[in-house]
Image: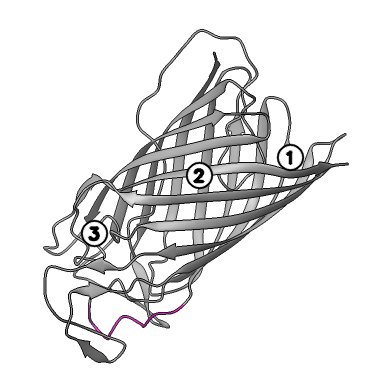
Amino acid sequence: MKGTPLSILILTLLLVSVAAKAQMPHDVLYMPRKTTCLALTYGQSSWNEYWEGTLKRDNLNIGTHTTQTASLMAAVGITDRLNIIATIPYVRTSTSAGNLMGQQGFQDASAWLKYRLLDKKGLSVHGVLGGSVPLTNYVVEFLPMSIGLQARTATGRLIASYTHAPTGLYLTGHGSYSWRSNIQLDRNSYQADGRVYNTSEVRVPNAIDLGVRVGILKSNWQTEVFAERFAGVEGDNIRRNDMPFPTNKMEMTTLGWYGKVQPRNLGLNVRVGYVVEGLNVGQSLSYSLGVLYQFNY
């Protein structure tokens, strides 16, 4: 139930006339060589029920939990086949009831390299390598109010897509594996997996995520529906009536919609997602709104 790792913070406007297409580490869009796209995005995710292990429940001491994220993202075209993507999120958590104090601050800086491996007759295959590092020394032992897990990550992703050129209809799927570093607590022992560990070092579970997207992409607009699955490779469950802990095995299945309008170099995008099933996470409804600007140099 960590603050969702997310997108985006200041917008630079330069007067350049160029057709713009924003891109992310899970799609197959690219910035052309010597082109950059900046995105400023605000997102919010809220839940009032969560899964304590497999038990779905509410908690009157929390009420509705809300995570707000503002992020700055830049996508840079090194070549027409190779892009660099980087993002810095600022995260804030709060609840509608109880006395848990919300947290806020810069979370984890992320960067990815995306490369088009194959592009032939509408079929394309892409490889993505990325990672993240915490930007600040935020508190991790205060889930679900913490803004992150303080773990450094390394991620490998493979994307495959087919596009029907006459209509713009596409089908895209991706799969990735994320390695997470151990973290340090401000104490010398903790309880997890039904036992006590006499150390301040905590092993955070590695994770996999899968996704499939069906949509239409035109020169100045895009719409798609998606299904995403995130799962920790290992870990334990939240203990009965206890707070979450970094060793918990978190899983969630999200269904949603994404849309974008970008007639020239300035554009807008919207994303809505709902968690339909999970383990040790909140059943959240999330949305984001972004402003995009592309320029060449």
**Camera-side residue of 290 and 207:** 207
**Percent position of residue 124, x then y:** 77, 46
Instruction: Identify which residue is drawn at 63% across, 44% down.
Output: 27
Helix, strand, or loop for circle 1?
strand
> Which secondary structure type mostly characterizes the magenta part of the structure?
loop
Q: Identify the residue under disc 1.
A: 216
Q: Quadrant of the N terminus?
A: bottom left
Q: Magenta part of the protein: which range?
A: 234-242
Closer to viewer: mark 1 or mark 2: 2
At label 2, the amino acid type is Trp
Residue occupying the far top of the picture: 15
Residue occupying the far bottom of the picture: 194
Q: Residues within 10 Å of mark 1 (few under 14, many from 20)?
A: some
Q: Identify the residue under disc 3.
A: 146
**Percent position of residue 61, x then y:** 18, 70
Helix, strand, or loop for circle 2?
strand
Q: Identify the residue under disc 2.
A: 112
Closer to viewer: mark 2 or mark 3: 2
261 in relation to 92, above or below: above
